[in-house]
Image (tube, rainbow, N blue to C red):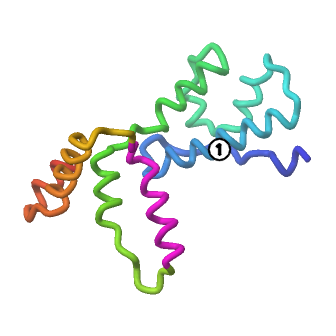
């Protein structure tokens, strides 16, 4: 069973475009592996080192515990989402030629992941709608780019 849950060696760069998704997936598979092998908690740092590349290990070489190492890697690889940009992507998404409605709905659903929607008052919702419409409708690409940053 261990061989099926064994994670790949994590070898990504914090500056890679999709590093946050890669890290999140790898950590989940690594935790599944640890649970399957009934690890001793004192062995966690040693097991971790076997499943990360040398460049990744250099990032955590000074960490004194497994928890500190994971926390450090999480802070390097998981980038905070830009809510304004995420909502703009959702608002401007279009169905691609040949894309089924089901696939388009799935794409829209995945685009909501970083939007951080929350319960708001009607007034706040109105303000957000005007803000989003301004960004979507503005003619100047330079101004839109700055607003999305």
Q: Is residue 136 left or right of residue 75?
A: left
For residue 121, which quarter of the picture?
Answer: top left
Kindly identify which residue carries mark 1: 26
For residue 11, which quarter of the picture?
Answer: top right
- Percent x, y for residue 55? 56, 37
Is residue 88 rendered magenta in the image? no
- Percent x, y for residue 53? 63, 39
Q: Which residue is rendered at x = 65% and y = 16% of the image?
A: 65
Secondary structure that dominates the magenta span: helix
- Depth check: give the residue in front, 87 or 142: 87
Q: Which residue is rendered at x = 47% and y = 86% of the image?
A: 98
**Residue farthest bottom in this picture:** 98
Q: Which residue is rendered at x = 29% and y = 51% of the image?
A: 85
Is residue 107 rendered magenta in the image? yes
Q: Is residue 37 above or below residue 109?
A: above
Within 10 Å of disc 1 (Cα), the crowding (few <14, some 14-19, many 20+) is: some
**Residue farthest left in this picture:** 140
For residue 71, which quarter of the picture?
Answer: top right
- Percent x, y for residue 100? 51, 80
Q: Which residue is rendered at x = 57% and y = 42% of the image?
A: 23
**Residue farthest right in this picture:** 1
- Percent x, y for residue 106? 52, 66
Q: Which residues are magenta?
A: 101-117
């Amino acid at each position: 069973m261990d061989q099926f849950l064994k994670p790949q060696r994590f070898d990504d760069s914090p500056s890679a475009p999709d590093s946050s998704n890669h890290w999140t997936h790898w950590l989940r598979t690594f935790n599944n592996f640890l649970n399957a092998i009934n690890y001793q908690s004192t062995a966690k740092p040693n097991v971790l080192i076997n499943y990360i590349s040398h460049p990744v290990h250099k990032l955590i070489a000074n960490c004194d515990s497994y928890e500190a190492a994971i926390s450090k890697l999480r802070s390097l690889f998981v980038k905070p989402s830009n809510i304004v940009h995420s909502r703009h992507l959702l608002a401007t998404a279009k169905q691609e030629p040949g894309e089924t409605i089901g696939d388009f709905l799935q794409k829209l659903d995945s685009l909501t992941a970083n939007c951080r929607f929350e319960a708001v008052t009607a007034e706040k919702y109105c303000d957000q709608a005007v803000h989003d419409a301004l960004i979507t409708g503005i003619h100047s690409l330079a101004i839109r780019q700055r607003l999305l940053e």
